Image: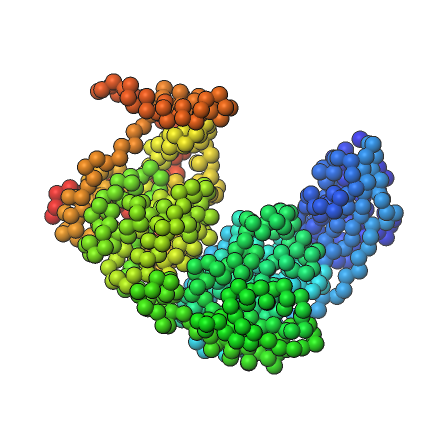
Amino acid sequence: MRSKTPAGGAGAILRAQQSDSGLEIRVNPSFVGQVSTEFAFYLYLAGQRIAARWYSGESCVTFSEASAPGRYTVTAFARSADGSQPAKRIGSVEFVTGGGATKVAAAEPRQVRSAPVPPPAYPMPRARPVDGVAELEAAVEPHAEQRLDVKVGAFVYPLLKQPAKGDSIFVVLGGAVPDRATIELPRFNRFSWRDDFPGTLVCAADPTLTLDPALRLGWYVGKSDDDVITGFARIIERLAQLLGVSLDKVYTYGSSGGGFAALQLAARLGRGVTAIAINAQTQVLDYSVKRSVDRFLSASLGGMPSDQARERFSTRLSAMAAWQQPQAAQARCLLVQNLDDPHHHERHFKPFCRLFDIAPDSVSDDGRMGSLLYHHDNGHGAEPRPMLGAILERAMRLKWPGDALTDSDESVGQAAQGRPDANAGAPVFVHIGLPKTGTTYLQRTFHEALGKPDQGPLQYPDVGFYNHQIAMYQPLGRFLPWKARETTSEASQRLRRALNRSDPRPMLLSAEALSALNAEGVHEFRTLLGGRRVERIIVTARPLATLLPSHWQQNMKQGGRGSLEAYARRILGAIDARESPAQMFCVLEAVRLWRAEFPDVSASVLVMDGGHTQNLLAFARMCGVGDDLRDHLLASVPLAAEQNLSFSVDECHRLLDINERIARGLLPLTARSEAMNNFFANRESGVSYAKPELPPELRAKAQRIDDQAFAELAGLPRLEVLRGSDQPIASS
């Protein structure tokens, strides 16, 4: 392909030409010296963004993606490397390709004049990076004004905190940025009002806006796989602990899109948190400015159609859906609405109030949800500052539903989870069973010994199954990497009743599914516990070299078709990269994930390398079981324990072939179970069969990962490692 003459005159900001590599875009060298040393470029086809080159010092980029005939547009953005100038759009140019030629649709790229960046309204302290929620304790200085950039998942969460005052925290969330070309991120709303709030003001900027240099409103949604509201919930909960503020003294505050985020954050936190939402959207996709919704869908959810987004992310895109979730029953909210803002009054305020039976300028029957109406000629503009006192006074009068509850009322009991003293003396032992580590045996034994109410000094809730996993599918299923097919509301209700029951005895919860949760799911599990205190996290583990072949066979029983080598390489690669599903297989990653949510909780790791009885006794010790209950457990060991038999090498090859033929429609689905039954029925008694093993290279890699994991575990505080093989069987 012959290189074309660059388009654009000597004074143009953008110059373009076609080369053998694709469409080449170059920023005028004179502009580089004038404005910035970092540039970003977007490539659009027929109005849809198809490629991007993120900020770097390169002022020339090539788009090989512009290969098909069509009308393309490239838009360029610039910012200073030292942060003194914010990101701004500097120009765009249009191309039409086809028939082997490329034409610039306009003689000159469209020039965009940028307004000067206004100075901040208050001096900004230097930002302090914080690597995760667990590091907040070392970073937070209660009596100092601070800028904190907290890294959680893929996002950095910017906070601006004033020196602590009073016994309350007010978390202010921002709405739309008026002009991304002239306003630098992060933007902190209402911090200039800090002296008007009767508590510590914490302004939280929306990291969603960093996904697109032109995105003005992100509603604190984040990305499809990274929920910003969950990240802020973890941060604010930990910050409240460090400042000595109970959650029923935390208020989330915002207007417009910030009001939506305030509703979402309070609903997620529950436990007495109060949302103050002013002229708020209550349904993101019903916002009147369609171009803002479309840009948000493109940047945040990969261009997902709105009807699909509404169905898939209902609780994240609708405050009405979020406030129907169980944890929101523990929260409070005040909706403040300007009657001279007709769109938000009719399309957002009224539907929310109708759904929750909130009368105008009144409160709901339970006193926890209220509304406040006013008139002002600024329409959808900010609430008048003189109103702040009246708004806060009305919000502080809302009732917390836990105050007048009785244990006999189940719905009441759910709300009681938020009280700081509710079940405070009833700790929970959380068992995270990594797959294929004998979890079923432990669960069956504890269910048999302790599954009845008031049976023994330790509670093991009876949810209708010996495995608590089934009961967790309803509240936690959306955070699992597989579809929770066995969801049963009855099991979930039984678990909630057990958690809400006033019973001072410790409780054990056990599920393999807990090992598969991501950080958001672990936080949701904490919400499920309500006021219960986690006493200890127990992780049962097994050497990777034996765990992976066993789990691979489990996959084959469910239709898996890949080889053991390919499967093991994928899992070991994920562990090396610290990516999901590493936490399911590597004990160190599981401990890291749960410690991030429960940083002050003791943890135990049990290597299940002993006999059944040895492993059981070691596990019982970790749960605080004494000798009296230990003997009772031994007497309750199931006489007919489930056998999870392994396949031979030959049987594995045959099953892989059967799965492949089922997938191609050559065999019925029943062929797999019939084959497995025949495998075991036709085995000769006393004959030893070769079992599948990892290739030597992967076996060595698995051993290296295990060695490194246990070496790091040995250096962690408040953590013990036990081996089942070290436990004596006889009673002491």
For the residue pair 620 and 364, the one nearer the viewer reads as 364
Image coords of residue 155 (percent x, y)? 55, 54
- The residue that appears at 75% across and 35% down in the rendered structure is 68
Image coords of residue 673 (percent x, y)? 37, 26
Q: Can residue 424 be seen in this snapshot?
A: no
Classify 120 as above or below 607. below
For the residue pair 537 and 25, the one nearer the viewer reads as 537
Image coords of residue 707 (percent x, y)? 35, 40
297 left or right, relative to 14 = left
Classify 337 as above or below 623. below
199 left or right, relative to 681 = right
Classify 605 as above or below 270. above
- The residue that appears at 46% across and 62% down in the rendered structure is 328
Classify 4 as above or below 241. above
- The residue that appears at 56% across and 49% down in the rendered structure is 311
Task: Classify residue 44 by image quadrant.
Answer: top right
Q: Can residue 435 be seen in this snapshot?
A: yes
Q: How many marks?
A: 0
Q: How is the image coloured?
A: rainbow
253 left or right, relative to 15 = left
- The residue that appears at 32% across and 24% down in the rendered structure is 677
**Quadrant location of the N terminus?**
top right
